[in-house]
Image (cartoon, rainbow, N blue to C red):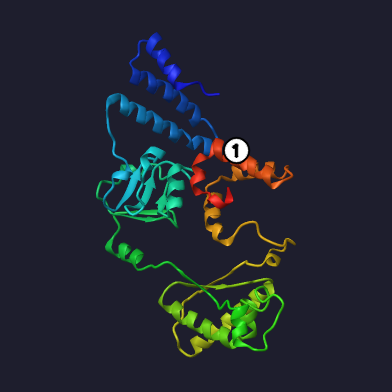
């Protein structure tokens, strides 16, 4: 158990005749040395929280005031050795265009804040702050984990002209929508039967028309295709074969198409998971938020939680263990967890 830094500071002031600032700084430095020796990445990165407390207390002792990111009134890229909770308190997303830090990893406060706000960020660059100067231009590529310092005009243009990929879901009609088209269409559960990919594989004329439009659009930017309501791998194979035929037809007709159109699928039916379950445990609209939480937890933490959960008997017991973990070790995750899942 960590001793109280306040009591130790008071003891140094009384017994060793130290001034308050020197005494407090000495106590916190000893604590930080212990954290630096820890191998666990999550606990090691909590040293930044202690450094934050240290700086804030010393500033108050000396009567210093430091403006945080809540005072920003113009768009900037924040470059720092590290970012702490007090640094980012009141952060305004519309002004922070990117975050770059020397220290930190995937579980650092800067990384968690960047993910939760959708801000491009690259952390753990060690000594980047030594090379950057105020008003330098930067390109922060959070996807590739790269930072370009003082980019050329060509580099800036390349990033400006590189739009994000557009994901186009192929026709996903079903249920009452198909019923309006066909008087002969009847089935007991129209929302889980002849719809999505099953419908388009049956009506290949409609499927090919849409794919032709998608592949022609791929000549003008990054396009990806997503097949809905996939249940078995045979559906994916059949759909990809039609994609291949459509692309070959367009090339033969001398239309321009993209070099490569990525293909993905949507897992929306319990049967497609192959787990013999009747329903999923989360509503689809919660999945993006759940992904944010999952990505902010380390592998070791996940494995330890899973091991505990597998020994429990009820969902309430599992929920209690997770809530205790968040409260004791990862309180910053509370802001990422949707109310509906608590």
Does residue 123 appear anywhere in the picture?
yes
Q: Which residue is drawn at 67% across and 44% down?
A: 316
* Up-down relation of residue 91 to residue 50 (above or below): below
Q: Which quadrant would residue 138 be assigned to in this image?
A: bottom left
Expressed as whole percent of the image width and height from the top left, the position of residue 140 reads 37, 55
Image quadrant in which the N terminus is located: top right
Q: Which residue is drawn at 45% across and 57% down?
A: 143
Left of 34 or right of it: where is 198?
right
As helix, strand or loop, the secondary structure at mark 1 comes to helix
Q: Residue at x 26, y 52 (%)?
A: 74
Q: Sort mark 1 into few (<14), some (14-19) or many (20+) by Cα contacts within 10 Å.
A: few
User: Foreground: 270 or 148?
Assistant: 270
Q: Residue at x 51, y 44 (%)?
A: 334
User: Foreground: 226 or 33?
Assistant: 226
User: Foreground: 70 or 79?
Assistant: 70
Expressed as whole percent of the image width and height from the top left, the position of residue 265 reads 59, 69
Where does label 1 land, which residue? 324
Left of 322 or right of it: where is 109?
left
């Amino acid at each position: 158990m960590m001793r109280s830094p306040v009591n130790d500071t008071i003891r140094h002031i009384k017994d060793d005749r130290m001034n308050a600032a020197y005494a407090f700084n000495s106590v916190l430095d000893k604590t930080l040395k212990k954290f630096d020796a820890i191998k666990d990445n999550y606990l090691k990165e909590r040293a930044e929280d202690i450094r934050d407390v240290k700086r804030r207390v010393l500033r108050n002792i000396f009567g210093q005031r430091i403006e945080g990111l809540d005072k920003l009134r113009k768009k900037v890229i924040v470059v720092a050795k590290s970012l702490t909770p007090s640094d980012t308190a009141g952060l305004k997303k519309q002004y922070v265009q990117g975050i770059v830090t020397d220290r930190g990893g995937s579980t650092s406060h800067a990384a968690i804040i960047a993910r939760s706000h959708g801000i491009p960020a690259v952390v753990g660059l060690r000594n980047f702050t030594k090379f950057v100067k105020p008003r330098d231009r930067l390109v922060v590529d959070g996807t590739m984990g790269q930072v370009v310092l003082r980019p050329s005009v060509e580099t800036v243009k390349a990033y400006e002209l590189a739009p994000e990929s557009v994901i186009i879901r192929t026709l996903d009609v079903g249920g009452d929508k198909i019923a309006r088209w066909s008087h002969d269409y009847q089935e007991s559960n129209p929302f889980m039967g002849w719809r999505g990919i099953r419908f388009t594989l049956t009506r290949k004329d409609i499927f090919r028309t849409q794919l032709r439009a998608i592949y022609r659009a791929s000549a003008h930017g990054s396009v990806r295709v997503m097949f809905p309501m996939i249940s078995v791998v045979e559906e994916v194979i059949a759909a990809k074969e039609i994609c291949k035929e459509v692309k070959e037809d367009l090339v033969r007709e001398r239309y321009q198409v993209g070099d490569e159109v990525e293909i993905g699928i949507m897992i929306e039916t319990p049967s497609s998971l192959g787990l013999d379950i009747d329903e999923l445990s989360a509503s689809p609209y919660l999945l993006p938020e759940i992904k944010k939480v999952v990505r902010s937890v380390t592998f070791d933490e996940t494995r330890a939680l899973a091991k505990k959960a597998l020994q429990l008997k009820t969902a309430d017991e599992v929920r209690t263990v997770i809530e205790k973990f968040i409260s004791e070790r990862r309180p910053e995750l509370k802001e990422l967890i949707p109310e509906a899942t608590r």
